Amino acid sequence: SVVSVKVSIDQSAPGPVIEPTIYGHFAEHLGRSIYEGVWVGEDSDIPNTKGFRNDVLDALKALEVPVIRWPGGCFADEYHWRDGIGPREERPVRINTHWGWVQEDNSFGTHEFLDFVEMIGAEAYVAGNMGSGTPRDMAQWVEYMTSDRDTTLTRERKANGREEPWIVKYFGVGNESWGCGGHMDAEYSSDLHSRYATFVKVDPGKDIVKVASGGYDENFAFTETLTRDARPATTGAISLHYYTLPTANWEKKGSATGFPVEEWSSTLWRAMRMDEILKDHKAIMDRHDPEKRVALYVDEWGNWYDAEPGSTPGFLYQQNSLRDAITTALTLNIFHRHTDRVKMANIAQMVNVLQASILTDGPRMTLTPTYHALALYKPFKDATPYPVRFKAPTFRIGDHALPHVDVSAARGTDGKLWMALVNLHPNDPAEVRTDFSGSASGQILTAQEMDAHNTFDNPEAVKPAPYAGETRDGKIVFRLPAKSVAVVSID
Ligand code: AHR
């Protein structure tokens, strides 16, 4: 039998706009994310523009990536920006102690990152070092990147090939201070944040959003303390990290492919925990900051599986399947419901690491189901979300009960009504009945297998296909196959 769900969209109660930056990415110096994934160097046989691989540049441009967070992650708190400027052959070689103890030759540094985001038309979110750098290092990095005053540092930038300052719209003050960023408690970290952030300054008339390194999962101490201590001069946003593990066990997280159906449901269920987690963090922020001056940036989120067998330890390389596309859609739908406070989110990570949109293997590249899900959702950028009312029946697999369908709706900047529809069931189709007429068409992402994925030999196993609603009794009805996500506009 086909489950049937009635939906109605309340167009009388639009929410705050869906910031495009909710569709942001995170790219750390980790494994093959930057090196090989983005940067191959000018002398590489892999086709490149100024050292950036062309296939990845094109894919990111096509995705209209709004913002990229860099250089970490844990790496940010051991990164000293001076290592990554000047002639490449003279840059120091360090060890990336967080991720595999491999050599970091610093050939990708400030100029490379900021040129790269300019090339793909994204905004820069630079994460500074609060863990092992000084406030002066941080202040000088910001001056080097953003100032158009005539100073020794800006002369150095010009001598290194960049005349005009870059626009760095977002600046993170440390990362995961409760863990790899220094194992601090919330009080100490908040004081340190205030101190460092005070000296992050841009030229008069320019803006930079200072992001405090916040909490994770259901750990609220950082959100509480940082919001309590936030001052306009130090804190424009607070970060939150939440990763989805199929098993919730960091020792044995579960595989990216070939997983049992119980891990389909546990993964979707844990991804959907994002909603409660956001509600709880937001409730704390609302207490200290009822005017919602401080934003919440979910600047690391995504599925974290066991690394692919045979891949380099510490490189966090994992396959990406239809399951990842479904959790991407569910998470984006959740972000659409929290636009009052959630103004940015960065999926971890962009290329070759964790829930990647793009995988590379030497000269080859494949776009993952996650990439295609993000691409389907492009019309939601800058759109105005509407509350959607529906009562989805639940189904249970293993220990987890899930709603059969999930729906999000918004008015796009093109003036059209857009809907995102997700069928969470691994086997059963669903029917979504609306109370309005018209025609609905768009694209759908689905496959026969739960772990359907793209490989370098078969890069189009999972890709979007045309999709349309039907009209029944004058109203639009959607027939959603099992395990699918569809995005449609209503005409
Ligand atoms: O994304 C991988 C790591 O996860 C990041 O470096 C860190 O911030 C988080 O713990």
Image (spheres, grey):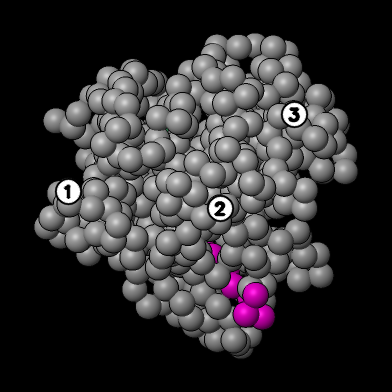
Q: Is mark 1 within 8 Å of ligand 1?
A: no
Spatial separation of the CA atoms under disc 2 and disc 1: 32 Å
Q: Is mark 3 within 8 Å of ligand 1?
A: no
**Mark 3 or 2, which is nearer the eye?**
2
- Secondary element under disc 2, as helix, strand or loop, is loop
* Residue at image location 22% in from the left, 40% down from the top: 258
**Quadrant showing the C terminus:** bottom right
User: How far from the left and from the top, in percent, is residue 218?
Assistant: 62, 25
**Observer able to see residue 369:** yes
Spatial separation of the CA atoms under disc 1 and disc 3: 43 Å
Q: Are marks 1 and 3 in contact (CB under 8 Å)?
A: no
User: How far from the left and from the top, in percent, is residue 32?
Assistant: 27, 39
Task: Kindly identify which residue carries mark 2.
Answer: 166
Q: Between disc 3 and disc 2, whose residue precedes?
A: 2
Left or right of 276 in this view: 366: left
- Secondary element under disc 1, as helix, strand or loop, is strand
Say which mark, if any, is on residue 70.
none
Q: Are marks 2 and 1 in contact (CB under 8 Å)?
A: no
Task: Kindly identify which residue carries mark 3.
Answer: 198
**Quadrant showing the N terminus:** bottom left
Task: Kindly identify which residue carries mark 1.
Answer: 361
**The quarter of the displayed image where residue 280 is located:** top right
**Mark 2 or 1, which is nearer the eye?**
2
Q: Between disc 2 and disc 1, whose residue precedes?
A: 2
In the rendered structure, which amino acid carries the disc numbered 2?
A: Trp
**The quarter of the displayed image where residue 105 is located:** top left
Q: Is residue 13 above or below residue 327?
A: below
Which range of residues does the magenta coloring cover? 413-422
